[in-house]
Image (cartoon, helix red, strand yellow):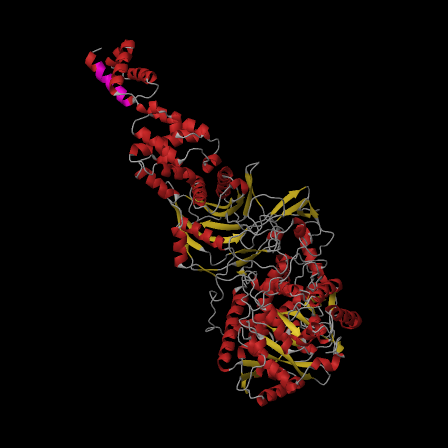
């Protein structure tokens, strides 16, 4: 039988508020163990939580970015569960009244992935197991999280990865999270089941917990899917259970013991008050939201006429997009947009060694200087080649455009002088001239090269080409 | 008494240090008998008193509670001083922060004598579930001080503290106050910050004073009822009560809850009838009213309180604070053993019940239903307050229990809380005031219940009774105060 | 309540119930539960209960305040090591956390 994969995701995203969700301790990553803590963080008897307003705002922004509805009324609940990294023996979370609900994400293949809900909650501390002992650090305890629960709408593991990449991009865009998988600020639980292709009845699912790399997600889902198919094919039934993925051996295995049997005994957190988010507040948050990736992408393609792939690269990181948009703000021609995109993608990106550097986009060229350069290029005062070389120098030395390009450079080459040089080129390269005349189009390139060399790159290559072609036709080589 | 002692200090007839020493001596002398204190902070108290004395020497003014020796129930967090909730599981625990109420009093240089005895985690009505053994009733040590704030009530009644702060979840201030012949005020839910009060049932718990007079209760309440950002359910009091305490009550409407009166012993009934007569003579309009839904308050109480307690007490796992068993095989084993050995029987029973009513499949039948019934009870009180300014009941159906006495089944024990529990369920303020003695010489108290944030009104009504009878029942029995006023 | 039910509940709230206690606690629990069960008979048609009622929107600003010194945080722990709360011995953490 042919089976179809069904996947749903529960994604935890750590919010980048300055302080924790229920106290004023910092949310900074790392730090000496138990130094980002206060009596609230370690659940001392008598302590009480105080909800961070920023967490609600960030979560609403995340909800809006994922096309969710924002609940006018929501509340916090206790999820009771005993484990050493949970100092109160309950996690303050949201049970039946999440802050955001009914959203969706659009994938590039046109499929819509439904978002069931987004709720806010606190992160747990960290346990380190070593030599039969456990070390506990509560620095991470109380760092705010949103849990984004998707509908079981994925039918292919690549859809899962694209969704997560899009989530990552979007959260970074609206600056609610840095979504660093390696630091655990984006983690997800993957629900996997299979069903006969064409069926509408889902199979029994398993949940793979705590996945923290795209690669492992790909492998784990693939493995789990095959495992379930094997069971079904041999006449068995899949057991609904929680699994862990053992990355070193590439298999999934069940992870629950008897003492882990749980029943969260949710009830409303009596130490916190209700949350009401008015329409006005939602509008206020929406009005402060930056333009999102998908909208930028559309604009770059449709307005600026940038090819889709280039547009994606420019829009992917907010700082890059901002530099691009600032640089072309006053530009008049489509050609300038394209020139700018080319310069960023070819010259500036080649200076970066990692995606992170790209994201930070720390360069010594201001968008004003970039605009000057683009203007010279647009007015054909400098050639494309010269623009590239100038930008390279600017990046290296931090100099301004006119520190590098001299007045003489800008004079360009007059048409008379260019005519003279073109004639010289033809005289000295008679063979190339004849080759071109006999139909070898490429031969013109070496003639243009000669002209550019003679003018130290200042000549307008397109003009030179036209003149050369005219003379060849006239002189009948 | 607070007013008079404040005057004595200001006029330098007695120094704060002398006063503190008198109280400490009295505790050392008397408390072997009463067991009201579980921790004595002598050094700390004397240091505080010293500060007050030097202020007085420098001619500085002092505030109303400054320099006055007092006590805190052992579930109110005190930085640097043990806070054990009288439970083995918190043995050795010393908080690293101060409860909000203690912070206020500390800033006022109040002289903390020590921490007082209570039922383990405030679960009980005899003080006998304390891991230190129960506090005794100063009127007769063969009887309990009541609970859970038995230690505070016993100490205040015996003159071992000028006043004390207790906590009240289902009657834990008012019942021991009544048993010991003292005044106990349970404020409106949200009038006093719970920050630093070790949680029993978060939606019911409230801190309040136990004092010898209504006037004192008013003075202490006015100091501690400030808004606290650390407790977002706390709005603080809406006004100072002290300025209303002598208001005329003629024409005031008092509803007497007949169900509660009918439940009471003959002696209690008689005493409370005399109170009613007194109020009528003072010009109040007294009528009998019925609050039929209060019958269900006890069920609501045991479901809600135990559910919240089961969650609040989950944190005692032996890792970050408190005691821990020494031998175990793994984390699960360690925590189960620590909790089983650390918690007493009553606490375990309530954790089990609370876990049960919240567990899968039972939530709607118990917890959710309890909240609906809770609304019904609140509505009934609201309706009553449309016709009456305050509601009057006995504080307890009986006077203090004999030590060691406990009904065979836990339910009968719980039923003793019938008059006090509905007040917590509805989040209302109520004060217990002494009004006589039974045939065994044990104090009787009555309770005045008011609308939310109407502490002024109930204290006014209570104070009028005290004025009228000129009664200070404590004095008669306990042999006076360490410092005669 | 059956013995099995009680054992499940005890497991959830991490309490051991010894053989000695078992019958005692079982009968206590039965008493309390049958008392609590009376609540099912209460008519709550017009009780007006709404989860939405009550105080709302009391927040803290997103501002960092200084944390406590590490030695304060660790002060009450039975065992600490290198700035961590520490639990030696056994297979602590034999399970993995499932809920976050």
Q: Nearer the viewer, residue C62 or A82?
A: C62
Quarter of the figure that contains the N terminus of chain B: bottom right
Residue B435, percent from left and from top: 66, 83
Query: Within the image, what quadrant is residue B23 found in?
Result: bottom right
Q: Nearer the viewer, residue A31 or B427?
A: A31
Query: Within the image, what quadrant is residue B176 found in?
Result: bottom right
Q: Range of the magenta residues?
A: A462-472
Residue C93 in view, yes or no? no
Q: How many labels sit on residues?
A: 0
Relative to A167, does residue A82 appear above or below in the rendering? below
Relative to C74, does residue A266 appear above or below in the rendering? below
Residue A467, percent from left and from top: 24, 18
Give the farthest residue toward the front: B59
Relative to B399, does residue A136 appear above or below in the rendering? above
Q: Nearer the viewer, residue A410 or A16?
A: A410
- Of helix, strand and loop, which mostly describes the magenta segment? helix
* A214 part of magenta stretch: no
Q: Nearer the viewer, residue C12 or B258?
A: B258
Residue B430, percent from left and from top: 59, 76
Quarter of the figure that contains the C terminus of chain B: bottom right
Query: A17 left or right of B88?
Result: left
Residue B30 in view, yes or no? yes
Residue B426, percent from left and from top: 54, 72
């Amino acid at each position: 039988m042919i089976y179809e994969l069904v996947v749903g995701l529960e994604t935890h995203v750590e919010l980048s508020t300055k302080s924790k969700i229920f106290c004023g301790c910092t949310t900074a990553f790392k730090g000496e163990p138990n130094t980002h803590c206060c009596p609230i963080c370690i659940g001392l008897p008598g302590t009480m939580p105080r909800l961070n307003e920023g967490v609600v705002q960030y979560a609403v922004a995340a909800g809006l970015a994922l096309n969710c509805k924002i609940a006018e009324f929501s509340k916090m609940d206790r999820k009771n569960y005993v484990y050493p990294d949970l100092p109160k023996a309950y996690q303050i979370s949201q049970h039946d009244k999440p802050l955001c609900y009914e959203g969706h994400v659009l994938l590039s293949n046109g499929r819509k992935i439904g978002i069931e809900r987004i709720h806010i909650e606190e992160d747990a501390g960290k346990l380190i197991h070593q030599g039969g002992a456990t070390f506990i650090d509560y620095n991470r305890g109380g760092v705010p999280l949103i849990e984004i629960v998707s509908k079981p709408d994925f039918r292919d593991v690549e859809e899962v990865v694209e969704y997560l990449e899009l989530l990552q991009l979007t959260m970074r865009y609206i600056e609610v999270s840095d979504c660093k998988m390696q630091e655990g600020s984006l983690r997800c639980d993957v629900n996997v089941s299979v069903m006969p292709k064409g069926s509408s009845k889902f199979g029994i699912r398993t949940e793979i917990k705590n996945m923290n790399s795209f690669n492992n997600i790909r492998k784990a889902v693939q493995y789990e899917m095959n495992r379930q198919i094997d069971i079904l094919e041999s006449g068995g039934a899949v057991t609904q259970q929680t699994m862990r993925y053992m990355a070193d051996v590439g298999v999934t295995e069940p992870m629950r013991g008897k003492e882990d049997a749980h029943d969260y005994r949710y009830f409303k957190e009596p130490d916190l008050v209700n949350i009401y988010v008015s329409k006005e507040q939602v509008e206020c948050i929406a009005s402060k939201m930056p333009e999102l990736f998908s909208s930028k992408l559309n604009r770059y393609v449709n307005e600026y006429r940038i090819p889709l792939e280039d547009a994606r690269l420019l829009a992917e990181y907010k700082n890059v997009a901002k530099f691009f948009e600032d640089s072309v703000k006053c530009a008049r021609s489509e050609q300038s947009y394209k020139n700018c995109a080319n310069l960023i993608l070819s010259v500036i990106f080649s200076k970066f060694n990692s995606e992170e550097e790209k994201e930070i986009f720390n360069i010594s060229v201001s968008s004003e200087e970039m605009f000057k350069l683009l203007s010279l290029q647009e007015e054909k005062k400098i050639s494309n080649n010269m623009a590239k070389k100038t930008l390279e120098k600017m990046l290296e030395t931090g100099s301004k455009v006119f520190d590098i390009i001299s007045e003489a450079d800008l004079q360009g080459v007059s048409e008379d002088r260019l005519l003279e040089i073109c004639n010289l080129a033809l005289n000295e390269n008679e063979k190339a001239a004849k080759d071109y005349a006999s139909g070898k189009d490429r031969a013109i390139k070496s003639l243009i090269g000669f002209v550019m060399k003679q003018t130290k790159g200042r000549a307008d290559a397109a003009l030179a080409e036209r003149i050369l072609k005219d003379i060849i036709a006239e002189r009948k080589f | 008494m607070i007013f008079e002692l404040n005057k004595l200090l200001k006029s330098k007839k007695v120094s704060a240090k002398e006063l503190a020493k008198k109280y400490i001596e009295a505790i050392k002398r008397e408390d072997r008998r009463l067991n009201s204190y579980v921790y004595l902070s002598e050094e700390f108290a004397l240091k505080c008193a010293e500060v007050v004395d030097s202020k007085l020497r420098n001619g500085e003014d002092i505030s109303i509670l400054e320099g006055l020796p007092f006590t805190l129930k052992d579930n109110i967090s005190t930085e640097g001083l043990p806070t054990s909730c009288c439970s083995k599981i918190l043995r050795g625990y010393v908080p690293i922060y101060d409860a909000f109420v203690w912070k206020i009093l500390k800033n006022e240089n109040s002289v903390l004598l020590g921490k007082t005895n209570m039922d383990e985690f405030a679960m009980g009505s005899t003080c006998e579930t304390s891991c230190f053994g129960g506090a005794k009733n100063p009127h007769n040590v063969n009887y309990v001080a009541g609970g859970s704030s038995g230690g505070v009530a016993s100490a205040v009644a015996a003159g071992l503290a000028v006043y004390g702060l207790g906590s009240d979840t289902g009657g834990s201030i008012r019942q021991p106050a009544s048993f010991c012949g003292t005044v106990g005020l349970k404020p409106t839910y949200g009038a006093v910050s719970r920050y630093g009060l070790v949680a029993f049932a978060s939606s019911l718990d409230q801190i309040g004073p136990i004092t010898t007079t209504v006037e004192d209760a008013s003075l202490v309440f006015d100091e501690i009822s400030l808004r606290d950002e650390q407790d977002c359910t706390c709005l603080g009091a809406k006004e100072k009560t002290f300025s209303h305490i002598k208001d005329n009550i003629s024409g005031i409407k008092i509803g007497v809850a007949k169900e509660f009166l009918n439940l009471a012993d003959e002696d209690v009934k008689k005493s409370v009838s005399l109170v009613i007569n007194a109020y009528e003579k003072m010009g109040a309009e007294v009528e009998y009213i019925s609050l039929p839904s209060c019958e269900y308050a006890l069920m609501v109480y045991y479901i809600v309180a135990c559910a919240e307690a089961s969650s609040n007490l989950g944190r005692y796992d032996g890792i970050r604070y408190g005691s821990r068993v020494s031998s175990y095989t793994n984390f699960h084993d360690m925590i189960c053993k620590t909790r089983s050995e650390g918690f007493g029987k009553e606490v375990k029973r309530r954790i089990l019940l609370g876990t049960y009513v919240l567990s899968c499949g039972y939530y709607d039948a118990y917890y959710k239903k309890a909240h609906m019934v809770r609304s019904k009870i609140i509505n009934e009180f609201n309706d009553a307050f449309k016709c009456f300014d305050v509601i009057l009941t006995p504080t307890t159906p009986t006077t203090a229990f004999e030590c060691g006495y406990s009904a065979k089944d836990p339910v009968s024990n719980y039923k003793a809380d019938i008059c006090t529990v509905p007040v917590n369920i509805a989040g209302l303020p109520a004060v217990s005031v002494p009004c006589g003695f039974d045939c065994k010489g044990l104090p009787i108290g009555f309770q005045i219940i008011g609308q939310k944030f109407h502490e002024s009104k109930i204290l006014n009504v209570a104070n009028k009774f005290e004025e009228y009878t000129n009664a200070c029942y404590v004095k008669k029995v306990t042999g006076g105060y360490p410092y005669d006023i | 309540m059956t013995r099995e039910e009680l054992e499940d509940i005890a497991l959830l709230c991490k309490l051991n119930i010894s053989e000695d206690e078992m019958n005692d606690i079982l009968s206590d629990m039965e008493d309390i539960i049958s008392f609590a069960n009376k609540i099912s008979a209460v008519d709550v048609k017009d009780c007006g209960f709404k989860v939405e009622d009550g105080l709302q929107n009391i927040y803290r600003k997103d501002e960092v305040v200084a944390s406590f010194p590490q030695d304060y945080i660790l002060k009450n722990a039975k065992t600490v090591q290198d700035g961590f709360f520490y639990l030696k011995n056994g297979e602590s953490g034999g399970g993995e956390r499932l809920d976050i």
